[in-house]
Image (cartoon, coloured by chain):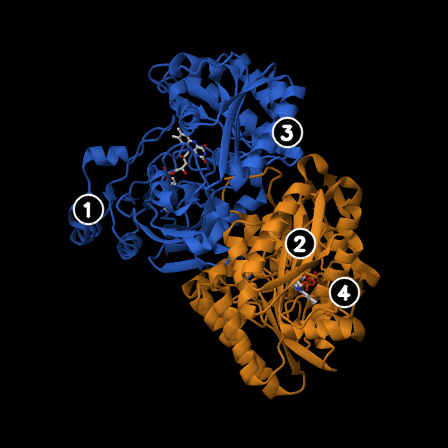
Chain colours: A orange, B blue
């Protein structure tokens, strides 16, 4: 329970930007997936770093938990408030503070979403590439080390964040990193906060890398006779050093759903969805090389999307796929798997996952960012059926165990949150204790997003 | 002083692989630059991770400092032993443990040098790109977050290390990272240990990314009318998205020295040394685009080096430049600066540095990895003249102050060690305290490479 004193201090600072209304609390306790709702006791909407610092300091003084909130699209219950406390919603901190085209950098507040950033950048010739499908906040994306369809070429959030402003658990404000392209000046704190899910501090400003808008863009859809063939084509392309901007796999079940619900009109076969970025010549050359690879692996003719509208239809269909799949079973929710394996093991991992899902009888279309060795099974479950949820979790855990055997990870991009906590010991062993030691060093009272990422006492 | 018990325990475990001979101690106390020698009390040569773990555990039990040692080429007194204790020399741990061509990875012991790794890889079609000039150990390179001439295209050590085995301050062995291309499974411990200079733990195994050997390589030398022109050409090329594999600046003073000592026969002008990697067409296209840029900035004709021997002569001259410059003043040593600034500020930073050096009367040729915004002044000083050393340090500190004003860093690649400790407060502010908190969390007794990187109590 938040002490009344703490609430009064927050109220006198924030006025109407402190909310304890039920609908607001519920909104900040819900999860995009199967996790039970866990609402906070209050939600605050700061405007400035200084306000965040004061909020956190007040909470620290009163022993109140603090949870950050971007757009709430994280999939493992990241933003829930199992111990109550205050959720800091960054939606008002949504300014693009500075564009530095000559160094290809931008400085933003954490509540800026990736789409609004790219809208703002349109005239500059630059863009921000990381694209997790959802129109997430850049603070949330950095906090989960998000990636998505374009990471295969541009890297993940970890590769884009050059510098941070962070409010620590005691309210202190620090700055990490610089605007230089590289530095050897001590521990890489920027990289430590990226992916820390708000458990070590809250990011109040991010300096991000930008990229030149590609001269030419070309997307394609390619069906394959077999799953093996599609995956082998990906492995071969990556091993040959092709640099697609996107290379996505969708299985037959996903194709059927997209055809039925989204008018995709694709042949009922496993598909790869691709995009190439570069000069006209480079794009043409890569597309031709990929065409040869596909043909050798039972790939059919490419269907090209060279018009911007066709491409945006393709990727918005891909981005909607999660919700389209959910909608096939009214009222259902999902357990979403997220393993990532070394590229050479991708076929093995996907074939085993597909067989296990088939044997279980659950619906679980598979799709993913296969150029990175990362894919998702969307395991559909009835939120009120504990047996189904347990079965889906068993499947997910088996996929993780297999991925770890293959040298991979339990989560390629979604993060740990609440839902993958029980897998960290298996993945990290004693290194998980080291994460706990770092957590205690920076947040000794355990008030920053408690219940997530590190071992719970 | 190492307690006799500790020495006996180490001796009974290591036999002749424990050394307390004066020449061995002196060798492990010396620095490549102006730092006074600070030898350890014993040097050990382990063969295995388990031995490293036992050595560190013995030292922990007896309160004895432990310092890692690769090839001793770090420039800021990194490997010196200001509090005595045991230096762990990794030279016997020099095995390439596993090459995984299908995932473009290699697993090595820390004592493998970059040249021996590339020799071993020659037949695979793959190579390891990071090249700090010196034939350093991969453990030492990871510990300092080294980069060098090729980082502009391939990134620094931080971008190559996929996974680590680390011995912690209490002797525990942990594993960080996986073989997957990305992961969101908790704090990025791999990135925390990379660049930590042996102050948080010792790396006993590294899993590194490999790259395909480029189909075509072409190097060039290009003189410019003015320093401004050379630097503006670099800025323009980087802003236009060119991807040179190397783009190095050498000033007129360096050119004169290379001509005199190394038979370089270059016109007495500031020069850029370049290399392009890629397909035949891509290399030709980039070279042509750079030619246009150079011509617009007062650049002369390119001198091309398309033969492998010519290229290797060029880069070995570049790599020897530090020692060639040192040799111009018999008996001299150097204070080597290492600031890195955002690319748009490079001209400003270099012009001010050159003017300051000129005004001081010291010799200080300037050269560096300008595509990254990183360059070095080699300030020549008499090791026994405290006034000269003080003047060189004053110049170096002024360059750092200017770089920080420009949004840059005190050290782009050499690291903090002993020599840049006093600059960390100015660069990081309160974030330096956070580094101290992490250090205390992982090394509460302050025994891992004491006196380096973090604030000293
Ligand atoms: C349909 C769909 C598709 C998706 N596809 C992908 C995908 O392809 N790739 C991918 O990576 N993810 C994907 N996701 C997951 C999600 O989009 C990402 O996790 C995203 O990065 C979360 O951003 P957010 O703003 O919604 O953060 P939130 O969900 O609000 O918060 C996420 C976490 O970050 C913390 N946090 C938020 N802001 C801050 C801050 N300023 N400082 C510190 N901590 C903070 C929160 O406390 C929480 O722990 C998908 C989600 C959906 C719903
Ligand atoms: C002529 C010359 C040119 C140079 N040019 C460049 C350049 O262009 N770019 C660049 O980045 N650097 C450059 N350097 C610096 C140097 O080469 C790098 O710092 C190199 O990375 C150090 O590697 P090493 O094996 O010699 O490490 P050492 O000097 O032996 O050790 C460096 C640090 O790492 C620690 N360490 C060593 N091994 C381990 C381990 N296994 N685990 C944990 N800690 C360990 C040591 O304790 C020490 O703190 C140059 C040096 C010289 C002499």
Q: Residue B47: image x %, image y %?
A: 25, 51
Q: Are marks 3 and 4 on the same chain?
A: no
Which label number is shown at residue B289? 3
Placement of the N terminus of chain B among the 4 image quadrants: top left
Foreground label between 1 and 2: 2
Q: Are marks 1 and 2 on the same chain?
A: no
Which label number is shown at residue A8? 4
Which label number is shown at residue B17? 1
* Element type at mark 3: helix
**Is there any visible trace of residue A82 in the rendered image?**
no
Q: Are marks 4 and 2 on the same chain?
A: yes
In space, the residues marked 4 and 1 are separated at their CA atoms by 66 Å
Asked if ligand 2 lies within 8 A of label 3, the reply is no
The residue lying at 61 percent from left, 15 percent from top is B226
Q: Residue A339: image x %, image y %?
A: 54, 67
**Is there any visible trace of residue B432 in the rendered image?**
yes
């Amino acid at each position: 329970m938040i002490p009344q004193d703490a609430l009064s201090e927050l109220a006198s600072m924030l006025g109407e930007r402190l909310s304890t209304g039920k609908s607001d609390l519920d909104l900040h306790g819900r999860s995009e997936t199967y996790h039970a709702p866990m609402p906070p006791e209050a939600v605050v909407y700061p405007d400035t770093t200084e306000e965040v610092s004061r909020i956190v300091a007040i909470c620290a003084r009163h022993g109140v938990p603090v949870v950050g909130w971007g757009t709430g699209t994280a999939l493992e219950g990241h933003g829930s408030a199992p111990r109550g406390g205050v959720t800091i919603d960054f939606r008002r901190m949504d300014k693009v503070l500075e564009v530095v085209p000559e160094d290809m950098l931008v400085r933003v507040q954490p509540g800026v979403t990736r789409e609004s950033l790219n809208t703002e950048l349109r005239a500059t010739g630059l863009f921000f590439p990381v694209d997790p499908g959802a129109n997430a906040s850049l603070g949330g994306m950095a906090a989960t080390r998000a990636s998505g369809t374009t990471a295969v070429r541009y890297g993940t959030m970890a590769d884009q964040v050059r510098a941070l402003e962070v409010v620590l658990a005691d309210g202190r404000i620090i700055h990490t990193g610089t605007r230089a392209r590289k530095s050897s000046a001590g521990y890489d704190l920027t990289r430590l906060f990226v992916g820390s899910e708000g458990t070590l501090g809250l990011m109040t400003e991010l300096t991000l890398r930008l990229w030149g808008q590609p001269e030419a863009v070309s997307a394609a859809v390619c069906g394959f006779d077999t799953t093996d063939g599609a995956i082998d084509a990906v492995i071969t392309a990556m091993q040959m050093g092709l640099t697609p901007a996107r290379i996505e796999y969708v299985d037959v079940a996903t194709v059927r759903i997209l055809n039925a619900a989204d008018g995709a009109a694709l042949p009922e076969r496993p598909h790869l969805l691709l995009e190439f970025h570069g000069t006209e010549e480079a794009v043409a050359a890569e597309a031709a090389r990929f065409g040869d690879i596909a043909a050798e692996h039972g790939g059919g003719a490419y269907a090209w999307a060279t018009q911007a509208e066709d491409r945006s239809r393709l990727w918005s269909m891909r981005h909607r796929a999660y919700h389209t799949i959910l909608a096939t079973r009214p009222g259902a929710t999902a357990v979403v798997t997220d393993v990532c394996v070394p590229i050479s093991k991708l076929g093995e991992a996907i074939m085993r996952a597909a067989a296990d899902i088939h044997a279980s009888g659950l619906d679980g279309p598979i799709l993913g960012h296969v150029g990175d060795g990362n894919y998702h099974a969307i395991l559909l479950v009835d939120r009120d059926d504990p047996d189904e949820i347990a079965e889906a979790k068993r499947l997910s855990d088996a996929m993780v165990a297999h991925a770890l055997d293959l040298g991979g990870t339990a989560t390629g991009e979604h993060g740990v949150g609440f839902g993958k906590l029980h897998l960290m010991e298996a993945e990290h062993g004693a290194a998980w204790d080291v994460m706990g030691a770092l957590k205690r060093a920076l947040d000794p009272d355990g008030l920053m997003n408690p219940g997530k990422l590190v071992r719970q006492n």
